[in-house]
Amino acid sequence: MPLVTSTEMFKKAYDGGYAIGAFNVNNMEIVQGITEACQEQKAPVILQVSKGARAYANHTYLIKMVEAAVIECPDIPIVLHLDHGPDFETCKACIDGGFTSVMIDCSSRPFDENVAETKKVVEYAHAHGVVVEAELGTLAGVEDDVKVSAEDSSYTHPEEVEEFVTRTGCDSLAIAIGTSHGAYKFTPEQCTRNEQGILVPPPLRFDVLEEVSKRLPGFPIVLHGSSSVPQEFVQKINAHGGKMPDAIGIPEEELRHAAQLSVCKINIDSDIRLAITASIREYFDEHPDHFDPRQYLKPARQAVKDMVAHKLINVLGCNGKA
Ligand code: G3H
Ligand code: 13P
Ligand code: ZN
């Protein structure tokens, strides 16, 4: 089937108590790993492209790789989404260039400016059959060249969401409830320790999510910064020459719970990076004489596929929903 928008996907996910995985794509092995897992698991999927991905891989290459995945995976609906579109011009370029969904992220700007830029993107997108994700509240972490410190991040104010959605006409809303971008989501000081001495992150603000959902019944909510930073990857990276002390993510149970509520889209990028890096570091350590990229990219692609399959089944609950 051709690329689709997320409208139907989100409606089914909302009603069915599951979420769609939105995975960042930057190269062929990532596209293949994600979509092969989704095809096998019969899971709908959102492939998302950041400004950094467009700068790295080139818009045309990314589009053509996603089109190839559409041909190779005929049984599943696939959305092509712009992640963290910084302005109208970038969103317009993606809408004109074949994306079926865009995010306009003016969450770090004052409320009225966020409304104005989002509304402009919505008008253009809807006139071209494309849907729009917007954001209220600021996540900590790094996105492209923007770095937001934990002190400058802020939870979404539930009392603002109805006015924002009504004035902008956006189709889904990303909110800040304690997730953040990257592989270092919490400092050890922000965490507690369980009996085994393992760091336990502070819980997500489900009270904020519930308050938002009450004010926007039936409306799809998006969670960014939702990698779980699996410790098996971190340990493998550290065991094979890497240095990622204190890398920590969002517990899978919390994401599963969010997916059962109004969260219809869960963004995952860092876990893909970790799966690939752990695999390649291990491979290089074990095969110092190998130099054919296919030799180490094949298991790396498989690691992405295995990780994504695990998410579809155990975290998102969207397996079998295509
Ligand atoms: O939200 C950020 C995503 O992980 C994309 O990261 O801007 O480095 O491509 P990137
Ligand atoms: P992670 O860094 O937690 O994978 O978040 C990715 C994301 O939100 C992409 O927009
Ligand atoms: Zn994000």
Image (cartoon, grey):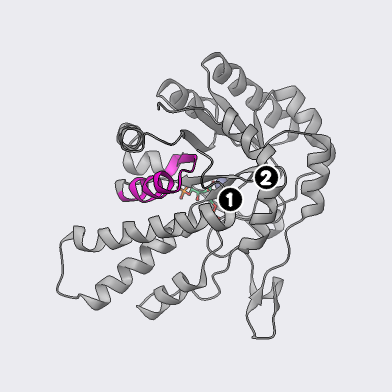
Residue at the spot of label 2: 17
Q: Note whether 207 is above or below 60 in the view shown.
A: below
From this viewpoint, is residue 107 visible?
A: no
In the rendered image, residue 5, in percent from the top left (x then y), is placed at: 52, 27
> Chief secondary structure of the magenta span?
helix
Tell me which segment is drawn in magenta. 29-52
Residue 13: x and y in percent read 63, 39
Q: Are marks 2 and 1 in contact (CB under 8 Å)?
A: yes
Amino acid at the residue labelled 1: Gly
Q: CA distance from mark 2 to mark 1?
A: 8 Å
User: x and y percent of residue 242 in the render?
Assistant: 39, 74
Circle 1 crowding by C-alpha within 10 Å: few under 14, some 14–19, many from 20: many
Image quadrant assignment for residue 204:
bottom right
Where residue 134 sits, quadrant-wise, is top right
Q: What residue do we see at 79% from left, 41% from top?
A: 212
User: Is ligand 2 within 8 Å of the beta carbon of the residue shown at mark 1?
Assistant: no
Residue 230 lies, with reference to residue 219, above or below; the image says below
Q: Earlier in the sequence, mark 2 or mark 1?
A: 2
Q: Which mark is residue 47?
A: none
Q: Residue at 61% of width from left, 62% of height from top? A: 252
Q: Quadrant of residue 280?
A: bottom left
Tell me the SS state at disc 1. loop
Q: Position of residue 321 (x, y in %)?
A: 54, 41
Q: Name the secondary structure under disc 2.
A: loop
Whether residue 130 is visible = yes
Density class for disc 2 (Cα within 10 Å; few <14, some 14-19, many ≥20) is some
Q: Residue at label 1?
A: 317
Return the residue nearer the eye: 96 or 142: 96
